[in-house]
Amino acid sequence: KRLFPRGSVWRLNFQMFHDLMRAVALGRLVGERYGDKVAGAGYIVTAALRLAAIREHSPRYAAQMSIMSEEDKQNHIEERRKFSPDDIMPYLPPTILNNFQNKAGGARLNLSSAIVSLSHFTWPPVVMEVEEAKGHPRGGVFEIAVRQLVDHLRGRVLHKVVLDHHGLIAARICAILETKGHLESDALAESAMIPAKETREILHRLYRDNYIDLFNLQKTKSYNPKDIVYLWHVSKDRMFKTVCDNACRAFTNLRLRTQHETEVGKEWIERAKEAGASDENDHEEDKMNYNKFCMGLERLVNATLQLDETIMVMMDF
């Protein structure tokens, strides 16, 4: 008996795919940030977000939603991101779950304590305690601070881009402007503890590349350059758009370069395939050239994958 009728059409569940990728990325972020303070911190966040993704995009839950009343649907939408320790246990790796089970008090108590510990962190915030864990029959009800974690992850990407393109001092200047708001160049130089001339040069480079903005404050109605105060500031939207545009442009260039290198190295690929049937590639120079070609192509592919992950964090999460 056929499980599916002939002619069935399938499609990829992109929403589920992206939410699961986000769960892994945010779990990795929390593990890197707080893993030394709370055992299994990253795995807890990944498990909770996996549960939320399944509740939102799984066909099984979609079928249940189709027979719910409007009031029940609204309640389900509001509750699908909330979880208790018992809810996420099936989604934890076996080794992590065994560690919680082998401690005094059992899995529920130890997992609840770990989640409560995560709720105390504020930079970035990780978990919100919806219902107090102490005395709760299910060990408490919690919710992952997804928006705050995504904002923190994107902020790290923006800082790393400025750091790589313009250096440590430029990244420090952007961080100060983001924290303090509008500043003159002299006040900014004092806050960053660098010479005023170097500060102005870096500010103009950042302004040229659309990472920061300049606001002209006129003291009088008549236009006089001496009466204008020049205030520098960071527009998160502008910086975000600049980084995304540059990343997409670089991704396109990498794909084109990979395609070009593959066409140029087609002869090396064909000769490598025929190496078993021929002694042509036994020449040391041929082997060296083929290895150089493979290493270059591998670097391009790795750079493309890393850039693709960056674009996914900035645009899809």
Image (tube, rainbow, N blue to C red):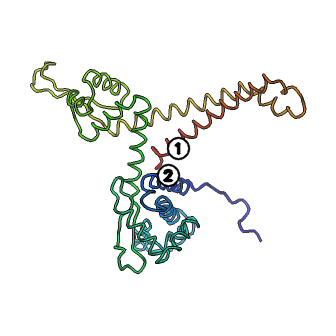
Mark 2 and mark 1 residues within 8 Å of each other at the beta carbon: yes
Of residues 188 and 316, the one nearer the viewer is: 188
The kind of residue tagged 1 is Glu
Residue under the point 53% across and 69% down: 99
Residue behind mark 1: 309
Of residues 222 and 267, the one nearer the viewer is: 267
For disc 1, the neighbor class at 10 Å (few under 14, some 14 to 19, many from 20) is some
235 horizontally vs 264: left or right = left
Where residue 166 appears, x then y in whole percent? 40, 28
For marks 2 and 1, the one nearer the N-term is: 2
Of residues 174 and 19, the one nearer the viewer is: 174
Give the total number of marks visible in the rendering: 2
Specify the quadrant of the image occupied by residue 216. top left
Question: At numbered mark 1, what does the secondary structure look like: helix, strand or loop?
Answer: helix
Residue under the point 42% across and 56% down: 34
**Disc 2 versus disc 1: distance between alpha carbons?**
10 Å
Q: Is residue 204 above or below residue 294?
A: above
Where residue 274 appears, x then y in whole percent? 85, 32
Specify the quadrant of the image occupied by residue 303. top right
Q: Is residue 93 above or below residue 264?
A: below
Where residue 238 appears, x then y in whole percent? 35, 36
For disc 2, the neighbor class at 10 Å (few under 14, some 14 to 19, many from 20) is many
Residue behind mark 2: 25
Where residue 146 appears, x then y in whole percent? 41, 56
Residue under the point 48% across and 47% down: 316
Q: Is residue 29 above or below residue 117?
A: above
The kind of residue tagged 2 is Ala
Question: At numbered mark 2, what does the secondary structure look like: helix, strand or loop?
Answer: helix
